[in-house]
Amino acid sequence: VQLVESGGGFVQAGGSLRLSCAASGSLPGATTMGWYRQAPGKQREFVASVTSGGITDYSDSVEGRFTISRDNRKNTLVLQMNGLTPEDTAVYYCRARRAHTPTFERWGQGTQVTVSS
């Protein structure tokens, strides 16, 4: 199973972007999907996640501006990003992870998001 992100790009501060992540095959049950990002010179950080049951979690920096959603039938993940700021500039990665045995983890290749001031 591979994850492929799309939807990144260049936007002015205050604008919006919608990122998508598509899995090439079915995901194991109880797999959490999420978004992470890595800015130049910084470590990769958590952005948002959603469990297979629809429970969401957000980092404090994006809470209230970003919305994560998934379609379990289509094995897709979406991150709607509103109110973007230059601090949101990063490469955004999709992740699928199952922590319980048998474990499972996949990362996408990343998509660039650039926000100008």
Image (cartoon, grey):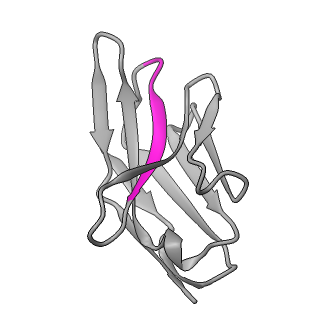
Is 39 displayed left or right of 21 in the figure?
A: left
Q: How many marks?
A: 0
Q: Residue at x 66, y 73 (%)?
A: 16
Rendered view: 22 above or below 18: above
Q: Residue at x 51, y 69 (%)?
A: 88
Residue 53 in the magenta stretch? The answer is no
Q: Nearer the viewer, residue 25 or 110?
A: 110
Return the x and y of residue 13 as percentages of the image width and height. 63, 83
Is 63 displayed left or right of 103 in the figure?
A: right
Quadrant that contains the N terminus? top left
Q: Residue at x 41, y 28 (%)?
A: 27
Residue 36 in the magenta stretch? The answer is yes
Quarter of the image for residue 50 reads: top right
- What's the magenta bit mostly, secondary-structure-wise? strand
Rendered view: 4 above or below 1: below
Q: Nearer the viewer, residue 40 or 100?
A: 40
Rendered view: 13 above or below 101: below
Please, which residue is most extreme toward the top here?
101
Quarter of the image for residue 48 reads: top right
Quadrant that contains the C terminus? bottom right
Return the x and y of residue 3 as percentages of the image width and height. 35, 47
Please, which residue is most extreme toward the right here?
64
Q: Residue at x 50, y 37 (%)?
A: 75
Q: Can see residue 1?
A: no
Return the x and y of residue 116 as percentages of the image width and height. 54, 88
Rendered view: 65 above or below 30: below
Q: Can see residue 18?
A: yes
Region in magenta: 29-37
Is 86 displayed left or right of 67 in the figure?
A: left
Quarter of the image for residue 15 reads: bottom right
Return the x and y of residue 95 as percentages of the image width and height. 38, 42
